[in-house]
Image (cartoon, rainbow, N blue to C red):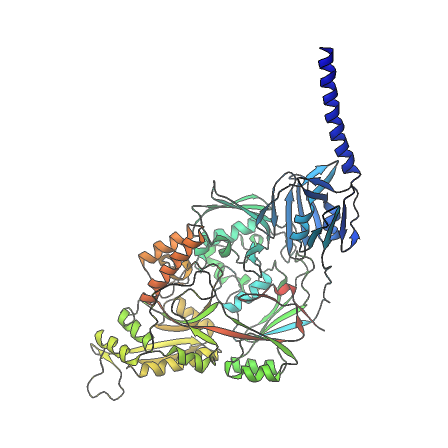
Amino acid sequence: MPKRFLASLLAVLMVVALFSGLSFAQANSPWRVLINGRPLPMEVPPRIEQGRTLVPMRAIFEALGAQVHWEDATSTINAYRRESAVVLQIGNRTAWVNGPSRQLEVPPAIVGGRTMVPLRFVAEALGAEVTWDGAVTVTVNHTPYVAPRVGGSMVFGATADPVILNPILSSDTASAAIHLRTNWGIVRLSENLEPMNAIADRWAWDPATLTWRFWLNPNAKWQDGVPVTARDVKFTFDSIIHADYDGPRRGAVRHVQEIVVVNDRIVDFKMRQVDAPFLFNIGLGLLPHHVLGNVPVRELRAHAFNRNPLANGPYLLSRWVSGQFVEMTRNPQFFQSPRPYIETVIFRNYPDLNVMQAAWENGDIDWFGALMTDHIDRILRDHANRAYFREVPSHAYDYVSVNLDHPILSDRRVREALVTGLDREAMIATVLDRRGRVIHSHQLPTSWAFGAQGLNEYTHSAVRARQLLDAAGWRVPAGSRDGVRMKDGQRLTLRLKTNSGNVIRTDVVTLMASYWRRIGVETIEEILEWSVLLDRWEHGRFDLVVSGWSLGVDPDPFSFFHSSQAARSPAGRTLGFNDPQFRNAEVDALIDAGRATLDMAERRRIYQQIDVILNRELPYFWLFQRTGVTAIANRVQGVIWSPTGSVHPERWHVRH
């Protein structure tokens, strides 16, 4: 027994000695970490766990220019560098970078009272490059950020006023341009068109409970200094869910069962089912509960807030003179650091694109987002020294919205005749100088869901169009002087509307009327101020409207073509974007199925099947996808581009 005891004791002592030696080696580690060639100052040496290097939290974050916040109650590390947000928890292999979660091979740990974090993960999350020499040195290379000079102003050209500065009620691009800068939502899109952090630092999906959880940035504030909290999130989306809501955003929360405030910084969306495009649909700006919380939902549209909104984004509204300009200035309460570089941003109104283009050429505005196609080559040549240009296929299309409740247009043969009577290729050559392509249904070539087979291209044929109208009972009376068709004593007369200030669309209206005249259709052209047009359109007081959609990244067409989005408020306003009143049970079922699966291949198949039906039923006459040219004065720098346009205007700056 004594010998066995001594042998066991010796074995234990050897194990202890072995592990003591490892700990001692850690304490006297030969490992080095270099940041841009210089040793990283550390109060304790690096630690190697499962082949991964852990370093002191504060040392690495601060060396990379990030601000660090420690939450003692949850052992959570929140690090911020410009727009980036990195969140880690002690002992948790799940981390978050700019919103979405990632899995760690080795979690953060507290060792000897020091918080240690995985070096490579942290450095790469903040945009640095990490290399190892194969021996004892880890090198981190990153470009220190040199902030541009703050100040100056930037002027955009516009042809319309914002309609309403309430993010849950607006649907126009002029209002959206203001919201982008003043009223942030819980998520936004990155330059890669992926959901990223905004008011929320991170989020997580629990498939077991069908719950999305969002953690809000603790520093986010409204411009009056009041923190942005989970109550604001709940109030915003509860307002959309409310029975009295009369805006176009109800589809974004169709599958939300309940919104729960966990605490000031955490909010849960409890879902009825999987909703694949959910993160892409909830980026709309938030409303301040402390300002609007006691306002009945039915009274939100008439509230003074819509003219003077409270901001939580990088800019705040400073002046709005209707018909002239909207001015925004830097928001001193904006939570991201550094704050915007441009002091003042102005959207200046012009009566039409021709006048706006002249203003850009004269140097009165810095940004012209829609160069007139017949002037592009000259402008690129004449202004090469004072401006730069961006030419990309837009993730948008021009189309004709068809009122399917109209007694004439409810006949599909008439709709097919009208679109067949259009020479869309000639229209592109005439009004776009060939910078565009004909499209035949909703999904664009810039979408991953594009590619439906067997679409009817409705190739231009006046002969075929006349045959269809004959078959529908619309004929030219014998002895007719104007050639307008009639049926049961009624002339084939249609009203074709579009908005003033958009020369391309007004030219399209004129061309369409001329094509239809050749097949016996009388067209009354109506060019209306945008807010007037929108009001009539949303209330169903239209035959045909020429307009355009700038599409979201997710191809879900729910808001446009689901029957529920054709419903009207008690006042008669369409509650979604389904202004044609398109109702099709097969399309409804397909849209619902596309939302209920996360399988991208299955969703692609579903959306291509929907495209075939839309192409056949023609709630729209699809016209073209433009290739736009944006002209930008050289003084505007740092513009961030996504595949579909510019993003993150808070990061731009101007020379001054």
* 326 lies left or right of 518: right
**Measuring 49% from the left and 78% from the top, which residue is drawn there?**
501
* 458 lies left or right of 76: left
Quadrant location of residue 409?
A: bottom left
**Measuring 22% from the left and 80% from the top, which residue is drawn there?**
475
Question: Is residue 10 or residue 290 the one in the foreground?
Answer: 10
Residue found at the far top of this picture? 1
**Measuring 75% from the left and 20% from the top, which residue is drawn there?**
10
Q: Position of residue 412 (x, y in %)?
A: 28, 69
Q: Position of residue 290 (x, y in %)?
A: 58, 52
Pick the quarter of the image with the C terminus. bottom right
Q: Position of residue 3 (x, y in %)?
A: 73, 13
Question: What is the total number of numbered labels drawn onto the structure image?
Answer: 0
| Residue 345 shows up from this direction | yes
Pick the quarter of the image with the N terminus. top right
* 12 lies left or right of 88: right
Quadrant location of residue 188?
A: bottom right
* 544 lies left or right of 283: left
Asked if residue 292 is positioned above or below residue 70 in the image, the reply reads: below
**Measuring 76% from the left and 44% from the top, which residue is drawn there?**
31
Q: Position of residue 570 (x, y in %)?
A: 38, 59
Question: Is residue 570 or residue 429 the one in the foreground?
Answer: 429
| Residue 64 shows up from this direction | no
Question: Is residue 641 or residue 362 the one in the foreground?
Answer: 641
